[in-house]
């Protein structure tokens, strides 16, 4: 379960980087990868305490295709623990580089088994 969660965190952030840099084509269904990976009850809490739902995040992503130029996102130090048979919590460092500026944050994600999701977790 932890290995699946780690793969999901890493592959989803690769997609975000490619999307924001315009390296993948925009078009209908292109954000299906993100839609399938995030539970309908998904919520992200940013470092400034703003809460964003899955629907709003997808809208933000749609409007930001190609908004970066040579930006980079990478993940480090993924750790996880199984909470129950169907649940796991992972914590990781997310780094973003745009221009000469590098910013990082510590993130946590709660996953559940989801056979329909790309890595089997949502």
Image (cartoon, helix red, strand yellow):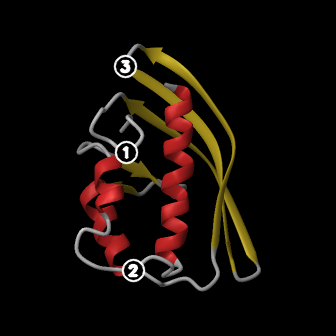
Horizontally, residue 41 falls left or right of residue 84, namely: left
Give me the residue at 38% from left, 35% from top.
Answer: 121
84 over 39 or under it: above or below: above
Q: Earlier in the sequence, mark 1 or mark 3?
A: 3
Question: Closer to the camera: disc 2 or disc 3?
Answer: 2
Horizontally, residue 95 falls left or right of residue 3, namely: right
Q: In the picture, which quadrant includes the C terminus?
A: top left
Farthest residue toward the top? 85
Indicate the quadrant where residue 80 lies: top right
Q: Earlier in the sequence, mark 2 or mark 1?
A: 2
Residue tagged 1: 118
Circle 3 sits in a helix, a strand or a loop, which is it?
Answer: loop
Circle 1 sits in a helix, a strand or a loop, which is it?
Answer: loop
Give me the residue at 37% from left, 19% from top.
Answer: 86
Residue 31: x and y in percent read: 32, 65
Query: What is the crowding at mark 2: few (fewer than 14 residues within 10 Å), some, or many (at least 20)?
Result: few
Residue 71: x and y in percent read: 63, 76
Q: Earlier in the sequence, mark 2 or mark 3?
A: 2
Residue 36: x and y in percent read: 29, 50
Residue 25's label in the rendered image is: 2
Circle 2 sits in a helix, a strand or a loop, which is it?
Answer: loop
What is the C-alpha distance between the residues marked 2 and 3?
A: 34 Å
Residue tagged 3: 86
Query: What is the crowding at mark 1: few (fewer than 14 residues within 10 Å), some, or many (at least 20)?
Result: some
What is the C-alpha distance between the residues marked 2 and 1?
A: 19 Å
Question: Closer to the camera: disc 1 or disc 3?
Answer: 1
């Amino acid at each position: 379960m932890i290995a699946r969660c780690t793969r999901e965190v890493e592959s989803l952030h690769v997609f975000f980087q490619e999307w924001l840099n315009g390296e993948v084509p925009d078009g209908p269904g292109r954000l299906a990868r993100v839609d399938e990976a995030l539970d309908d009850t998904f919520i992200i809490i940013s470092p400034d305490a703003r809460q964003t739902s899955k629907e709003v995040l997808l809208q933000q992503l749609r409007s930001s295709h190609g908004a970066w130029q040579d930006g980079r996102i990478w993940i480090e130090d993924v750790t996880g623990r199984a909470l129950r048979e169907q649940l796991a919590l992972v914590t990781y460092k997310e780094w973003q580089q745009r221009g000469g500026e590098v910013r990082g944050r510590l993130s946590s994600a709660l996953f559940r088994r989801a056979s329909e999701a790309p890595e089997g977790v949502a």
